[in-house]
């Protein structure tokens, strides 16, 4: 059940990121100077930490979505649901931890 809740929360979070991303990118057509100013505000450690959360959400949402597709459309999916959830967690950690190390070294290290 918690994966169901997390899937919905990450989906809503990704939606709002995409909405803001489209709006700030569209600003370049209105005023390139305003676009540069908005992008400049994104270059701070708080946004760097939010980017870590965004990548965490995208990775979980993507791999959990594949798991849900397998549960729904593969005859043996419901039987292996627990193992697939463990697999989602393992793949998430394997991909997320190196990203966090590299990204935070850029955000805080220069």
Image (cartoon, rainbow, N blue to C red):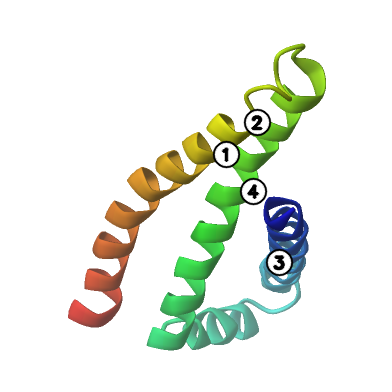
Earlier sequence position, callout 1 versus callout 3: 3
Q: Nearer the viewer, residue 44 or 13?
A: 13
Q: Residues within 10 Å of mark 2 (few under 14, many from 20)?
A: some
Give the SS element for disc 1. helix
Give the SS element for disc 4. helix
How far apart marks 4 and 1 lie (CA) works out to 12 Å
**Residue 13 image label:** 3
Q: Are marks 1 and 3 in contact (CB under 8 Å)?
A: no
How far apart marks 2 and 3 lie (CA) works out to 25 Å
Residue 78 lies left or right of residue 41; in this view the side is right
**Which quadrant of the figure has residue 80?**
top right
Relative to 16, say whether 78 is above or below: above
The residue indicated by pointer 4 is 61
**Residue 81 image label:** 2
Outermost residue, top direction? Answer: 75
Earlier sequence position, callout 2 versus callout 3: 3
């Amino acid at each position: 059940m918690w994966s169901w809740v997390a899937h919905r929360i990450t989906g809503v979070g990704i939606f709002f990121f995409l909405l803001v991303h489209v709006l700030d990118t569209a600003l370049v057509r209105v005023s390139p100077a305003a676009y540069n100013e908005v992008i400049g505000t994104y270059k701070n450690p708080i946004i760097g930490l939010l980017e870590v959360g965004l990548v965490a959400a995208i990775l979980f949402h993507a791999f959990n979505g594949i798991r849900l597709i397998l549960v729904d459309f593969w005859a043996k999916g419901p039987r292996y649901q627990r193992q697939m959830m463990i697999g989602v967690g393992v793949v998430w950690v394997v991909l997320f931890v190196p990203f966090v190390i590299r990204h935070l070294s850029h955000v805080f290290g220069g």
